[in-house]
Amino acid sequence: MQELTDERFQQLIDNALGELPQKSLDHLKNVAILFEDEPTPDQRVKLDLSPDQSLYGLYEGVPLPFRQGQSPTLPDRITLFKLPILGSSDDEAALKEQIKHTLWHEVAHYYGLNHDRIHELE
């Protein structure tokens, strides 16, 4: 995939968010949806990623089912990682699909779903 401006990448994220099922978004509150070029070294260490592992997205926060009625003051964060996503996409259609898939995956973590359950639903 060729280079993509940050503005265009953000536009693709916004479009993907608009394509997610409404029921996935109904209770999504106080969540910042961001993007960075790549995960930070601290994020890679925290997730125990090897140097050759790619990370497309990351949910950071307290999943909804574990809040015990409390509302955090700081927003949860969903970060999509632009360069790994671009590296996995051969064309714009694949890029759009990867962004949408990654965004849905991280929203699912917000709702407390683990990787096994997410893969079952996919």
Image: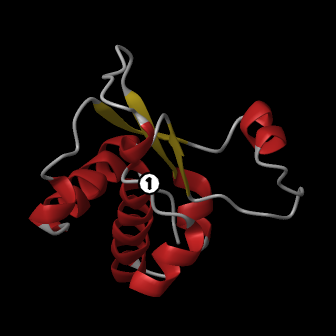
User: On the image, which quarter does residue 116 sit in?
Assistant: bottom right
Q: Position of residue 104 (x, y in %)?
A: 35, 64
- The residue carrying pointer 1 sits among few (fewer than 14), some (14 to 19) or many (20 or more) residues within 10 Å by Cα, namely some
Q: Position of residue 53 (x, y in %)?
A: 79, 64
Looking at the image, which is closer to me, 16 or 106?
106
Q: Residue at x 30, y 54 (%)?
A: 13
Whether residue 89 is visible to the viewer of this picture, yes or no, is no
Which quadrant is home to the C terminus? Answer: bottom left
Give the residue at mark 1.
112
Q: Amino acid at mark 1?
A: Gly
Looking at the image, which is closer to me, 42 or 24?
24
Looking at the image, which is closer to me, 101 or 14?
101
Q: Is residue 116 left or right of residue 26?
A: right
Residue 9, placed above or below residue 43 = below
Q: Residue at x 22, y 51 (%)?
A: 14
Residue 115, placed above or below residue 112 = below
